[in-house]
Amino acid sequence: MVNLILFGPPGSGKGTQAKMLVEKYNFFHISTGDMFRYEMKNDTPLGKKAKEYIAAGNLVPDSLTIAMLKKQVVANQDVYGFIFDGFPRTTPQADALDILMNSLGNSVNKLIALDVNDQEIIDRLQGRAKIEGRADDANVETVKNRIEVYKQNTTPVFDYYENFDKSVKVDGIGSLDEVFERICNEL
Ligand code: ADP
């Protein structure tokens, strides 16, 4: 198995690039953001719990997120490898992921971080709000909070994997194909 974390701030293009990687390499794509949106759309108990955190641009508590992620990994063992998109977002989540992968005889092979500046994020998310209609994209204050949460809680995950020589940065500015090529060069 080849297991990849696609990392970066909100709006850095993780989801789009993950889909392109799935087409080329047959990865199984796990997006915790997509999973939460599915739970909220179906008004499940988990969706109800996650809703307020997401609306405010805060992280859903680790316990809920890790349990949801585990279920999805365990249920899909017969795959080429996983792309983790939007997970791990905290160091306890990274610890939990490593323990889980090890227990399944696997590991995280690489973290690829898409490098995009704050103003570009704000511009992109305002554009996406018009297309996808996500409330957490439409409100600029919520977007700024998400960027802040990313810097405070999520960037340590880059360092966590850098300690194992697994983290690389890729320039996230450019056309979809240009960014895709940069990612593929790292694989
Ligand atoms: P983006 O990368 O554009 O911020 P996502 O779809 O990955 O969007 O996430 C949307 C929201 O879902 C996040 O702002 C957060 O509230 C919640 N979420 C997603 N993944 C996680 C996670 N791993 N841990 C905690 N909360 C998460």
Image (cartoon, rainbow, N blue to C red):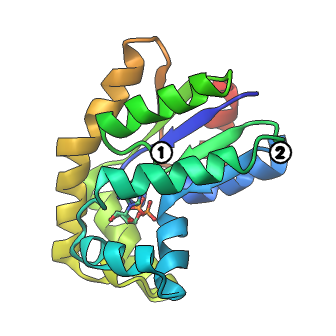
Give the label on residue 26, or none. 2
Number of residue marks: 2
Image coordinates for residue 186, horizontal then vertical, percent: 63, 25
Element under label 1? loop
Tell me if residue 123 comes above or below residue 30 in the rendering.
Answer: below
Image coordinates for residue 74, horizontal then vertical, percent: 67, 45
Depth check, front residue: 178 or 90:
90
Q: Nearer the viewer, mark 2 or mark 1?
A: 2
Q: Quadrant of the C terminus?
A: top right
Evaluate if marks 2 and 1 touch, with contact meaning CB atoms under 8 Å apart: no
Q: Amino acid at mark 2?
A: Asn
Q: Is residue 173 left or right of residue 90?
A: right
First in sequence, mark 2 or 1: give its number.
2
Tell me if residue 107 comes above or below residue 4 in the rendering.
Answer: above
Q: Which residue is at 55% across, 47% downward? A: 70
Give the label on residue 127, or none. none
User: Where is mark 1, residue-wise?
Assistant: 172
